[in-house]
Amino acid sequence: MAVAENINSLSLNLKSGSLEVRLAENSLEIDAAQALRYKVFYQEMKAKAGLKQTRQKRDFDDFDHYFDHILVLNNNIKGSFHNKVIGTYRLNRGGQNNGEKLFYTSGEYNITPLIENGGNILELGRSCVAKKYRTGATMQLLWSFIAQYIIKYEIDIMFGCASFPGVNPNIHKNSFDYLYRNYLAPKAIRPTALKERFIKMKSEAYKKMSFKDFLASIPPLIKGYIRLGALVGNGAVIDYDFNTTDICIVLPTEKIASRYKLHYDRN
């Protein structure tokens, strides 16, 4: 079982066997996360890398500076620190530039309702785990850490872009329609795809799906969000660089926080 080390300390940390989850502490450790992201997104999933990314074999953007970077480490792996990093996720509580909050999701969605809602919000992104470690145990440890984080910083709502493979949204029209009809976020906290990128999720020619078939039709990460109580924004967006079609996840944290806080209070 993962052991939480002082939920109220600045140094959030979880350990389970050889695996450890914590935040990157310096630029070298962030570089290790970016190296793993390059391997997964560009080499494995065939996203289109820019010249700088290709030359450095790193996935990076101007938003990395504003995020906390989660690292999943396998401490049994020998060699450099970079070799030990087998998973990563980045979290943004609203990095600011000249007083303006900056979020990656704003490039695809109008998230004004979330920003103006009044609660503390957290943007999730760039989730990836090395292929060998894509197991329920790894994801459970990762989400246990995120639960620590949202409790510590009193986060009310998490959000971010989540991806379906490919740039043909018609392939996923039944899944999009099911999400729209059953999981559309309330207007007060509903992001909407930017007008010039908006792809309609509601389909008039949809095929009715059972919940079981719906779960089978969506990527594992989105399935995990749904099981945690996620809702979705209105509209999908094609991301040609990453060869994906994105939706916006909106995840109120009340259930997650209360579940994990009870666990920590008992230990």
Image (tube, rainbow, N blue to C red):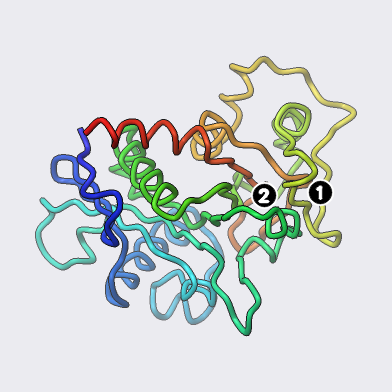
Q: Position of residue 209 (x, y in %)?
A: 71, 18
Residue at figure coordinates x 39%, y 42% from the top left: 143
Seen at 41% across and 61% down, the residue is 37
Give the residue at the far right of this rendering.
204
Residue lying furthest bottom in this view? 98
Residue beneath disc 2: 245
| Circle 1 Cα neighbour tier, 10 Å, few/some/many (<14 / 14–19 / ≥20) | some
The residue pinned by badge 1 equals 199
User: What is the three-letter code of the residue carrying label 2?
Assistant: Thr
**Dot 1 amino acid type:** Ile
Numbered mark located on residue 265 in the image:
none
Q: Quadrant of the N terminus?
A: top left
Q: Position of residue 138 (x, y in %)?
A: 30, 40
Q: Secondary structure at mark 1?
A: loop
Query: 132 or 189: nearer the eye?
Result: 189
* Vertical placement of residue 87 versus 79, above or below: above
Compared across the picture, whether 28 is left or right of 160 comes to left
- Are dots 1 and 2 in contact, CB under 8 Å? yes
Residue 207 pos. (x, y %)? 79, 21
Would you identify the image quadrant in which residue 89 lies?
A: bottom left
